[in-house]
Image (cartoon, rainbow, N blue to C red):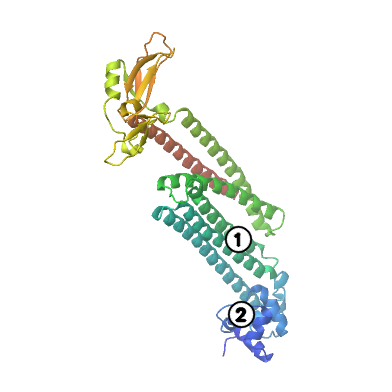
Amino acid sequence: MEKKTMGSFIAALRRANGMTQRELAERLNVSDKSVSRWECDDGYPDLSLIPVIAEIFGVTADELLRGERKVSVEGDSNDSGNGHEAGLGRKGQKELEHMKNMALNNFRSMSFMSIGVSLLGLVAAAICNLAFNRASLGFLVGCIFFVSSIVFEAMVLNSFLSMNSMDEHDDNRRFGVIRMAEVSFFVTAVLLSFTLPLVLMVSDSHLGLSVGGWFKYGCLSMLAVAVLLAIVIHIVNGCLVGSGRIALDEESKGEYQMKHRLQTIVGGALLVALVVTFIANEALTAMWGPTSVMTGTVFNDYESFLEFVETDVPRPSSFGSNQQAGVAVRIAPESEATVYYDENGNAVSKDEALTRTIEDGDGNTVLEYVQRNGNVLSVSYSTGSNDGNILPITVYTYEDYREGRLVVQQRNAVFACIYVLEIIAAVIVYVLLRRKDK
């Protein structure tokens, strides 16, 4: 005995009404290939099309879902659901539920595809920036993928919500779909924010951004956008459920409102803790940055100081060019001598360009020297005395600065651990409160 299906029933009804697949497709505003797939049981019509097809062929939605004309059996008509499901028999309700689940699974697959497109956008941006040194181009290429992902997800979401409009009492499933779409939009927005430094931190469109700089500022941008979006989504979802725009059943609504209340309390406390920790971190960095915590070399006599600063030592390559601060030079071919300029643009000798003076509190020159040591970052001394004595003199080198920066990085790492511990503590508190309420 041939199994009765919706597809074969649609085919039989179409032939009985003398219609071709193309004619039926035109009336439903779909392609004739879609009609062919339905009739071959290779898919189902959208739920929104079920009542339209039923009306075209003069049958009920239940009969269409059952795949056969309904024979009136006492008691079968009492197996009715709510709303548009009223009057559906057992087989019709089962078929309808199966179609809804298939549509939901299809929507989830489309959402994951949308997230995949966003990830491809990040990869494309990274290739343009790191491989071709074109940060701005990387951002633009990434944006093409991100915008495509958002548009695609919006179209799929609209299609699903329209398809399920025939069932006004299925808001639990609809709300789950909305939240899945929110996840897709959230991921895309966060990835987009990660690429923002490619255009904000690079002034020349023909330059790239280093991996370290991109990662640092990208993570900060991503964190800020993630927190902002999480707050917005939390508020919007609460308003949708609280106002009745999403009519969940009583049990689901009560459970959601309880979770929403806990998330508001715990999330708010976590946000305050993170902000306070961030302010403390920034305050400590401002007061005790690399230049404040670095230790220099102290000289108690002029002879040892002059010997140190006038020794010809190149500037560390890790800090860029060997050109010393405050000295203007013209890079000349090997056959020509390098030309040095003073602050007024006049050509001077190298020693004149590197000449430094130390003055006391009255502005009198105490010491004059030629700073040939390119490793010297700065010189510190006291000018409070008027007797010409400025000793001791402290010299800070680039190695001292590197060590000071390492101290600051270690402190920042401690604060990063504090951030993580605060988040973990918030999660633990939330889980414990959820269990207690249950």
The residue depicted at 55 percent of the width and 37 percent of the height is 275
The residue carrying pointer 2 sits among few (fewer than 14), some (14 to 19) or many (20 or more) residues within 10 Å by Cα, namely: some
Q: Is residue 256 left or right of residue 281?
A: right
Whether label 1 touches label 2, CB < 8 Å:
no
Q: Is residue 429 left or right of residue 324?
A: right
Element marked by disc 1 = helix
Element marked by disc 2 = loop
Residue 307 point in image, percent of width and height: 26, 21
Q: Which residue has dot 2 on it?
A: 31
Q: CA distance from mark 1 to mark 2?
A: 30 Å
Quarter-of-image position of residue 49: bottom right
Locate the N terminus by quadrant: bottom right
**In the image, is residue 168 above or below residue 66?**
above
Q: Amino acid at mark 1?
A: Gly
Number of numbered markers: 2
Q: Is residue 389 something one can see in this rendering? A: yes
Q: Amino acid at mark 2?
A: Ser
The residue carrying pointer 1 sits among few (fewer than 14), some (14 to 19) or many (20 or more) residues within 10 Å by Cα, namely: few
Residue 43 point in image, percent of width and height: 57, 78
Q: Which residue has dot 1 on it?
A: 176
Residue 279 point in image, percent of width and height: 53, 34
Quarter-of-image position of residue 352: top left
- Residue nearest the viewer, comparing 368 with 382: 368
**In the image, is residue 220 above or below residue 386?**
below
Residue 321 point in image, percent of width and height: 34, 38
Mark 1 vs mark 2, foreground winner is 2
- Residue nearest the viewer, comparing 111 with 300: 300
Q: Is residue 5 something one can see in this rendering? A: no
**In the image, is residue 356 above or below residue 430?**
above
- Residue nearest the viewer, comparing 213 with 116: 213
- Marks 1 and 2, the one that precedes in the sequence: 2
